[in-house]
Image: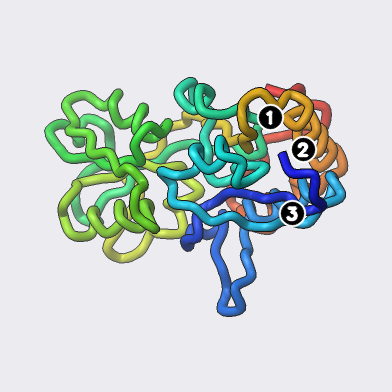
Amino acid sequence: MTASRTLRVICADLPAPPLFERDERGERHGYEADVARLIAEQLGRRVEWVYRQWSDFYPALDAGEGDLLLCGQGISDYRKTLGDFTRPYAIFDESVMVRSGSGITSPQHLEGLRVGAIANSLNMTLTETFTGVVPVPFDGASDDVFGDMVAALRSGDIDALVDDDVALVPLEADDLTIAFTVPTRNAWGAVVAKRQPDWLASVNRALDEIIANGALKSTWERWMPTLDYPFEAGQPVQ
């Protein structure tokens, strides 16, 4: 963990509103971007973005290239082997997106079909629970793994994709629709490198404070007004 007055935050440099995207001036906006800034403010630092491909997040964190990974990381047993998670800063359900007119409205309609999700994600874990599907993992080795999945759905290379509802709601259009949503209540956390308990505790205190003072709720309601805010002040670290 760096001793400088910056907070080096590892994330992907791709458009994923309302979580994050960059404007024409290169400024980063969105819910996760603002969460990183709120944490940095509590720590007396300023954010410095460290852009990496999805598959390189944990190697970069382990190598000390960033102080914190904050980029759509659902808390899973597998990911806990790669880094140490903070308390959640978001909780989302998972949705299945399909091409409009497909007739898919339930898990039963997916039997025998190719269903995409990011490899080793909670979304892939859900995909594998659907009876008879052919899971198609996207490994994050490209610059835009999420965009790759959407393109594969549009081209017919896959029949459906699974991701958290926050990422899919903005994509609904004439050609794509959400078939159904599963109330999985996936918790997302920030991640620090292993064996840094004091640093993890500091980030957790910063998260506790922005929940207690209402800043996280205000940020949530700014970027995701249609989703219910999931936290209240005083909730314990999970």
* Disc ID at residue 136: none
Say which of 113 and 205 sits in front. 205
Callout 3 secondary element: helix
Q: Amino acid at mark 2?
A: Leu
Give the mark nearer the N terminus: 3 vs 1.
3
* Disc ID at residue 87: 1
Question: How many residues crowd mark 2 within 10 Å: few (<14), some (14–19), many (20+)?
Answer: many
Residue marked by disc 3: 37
Residue 41 locus on image (x, y percent)? 83, 51
Q: Quadrant of residue 195?
A: top right
Q: Amino acid at mark 3?
A: Arg
In which quadrant will I find the N terminus?
top right
Residue located 58% across and 49% down the image = 10
Contact (Cβ within 8 Å) of mark 2 with mark 1? yes
Give the mark nearer the N terminus: 2 vs 1.
1
Q: Amino acid at mark 1?
A: Arg
* Disc ID at residue 207: 2
Residue located 27% across and 59% down the image = 151
**Horizontal side, residue 199 vs residue 138: left or right:** right
Callout 1 secondary element: strand
Tally the numbered discs.
3
Say which of 194 and 110 sits in front. 194
Give the mark nearer the N terminus: 3 vs 2.
3
Whole-number angstrom distance, CA of label 3 to CA of label 2:
11 Å
Question: How many residues crowd mark 3 within 10 Å: few (<14), some (14–19), many (20+)?
Answer: some
Say which of 194 and 112 sits in front. 194
In which quadrant will I find the C terminus?
top right
Callout 2 secondary element: helix
Is any part of residue 225 visible from this angle?
no
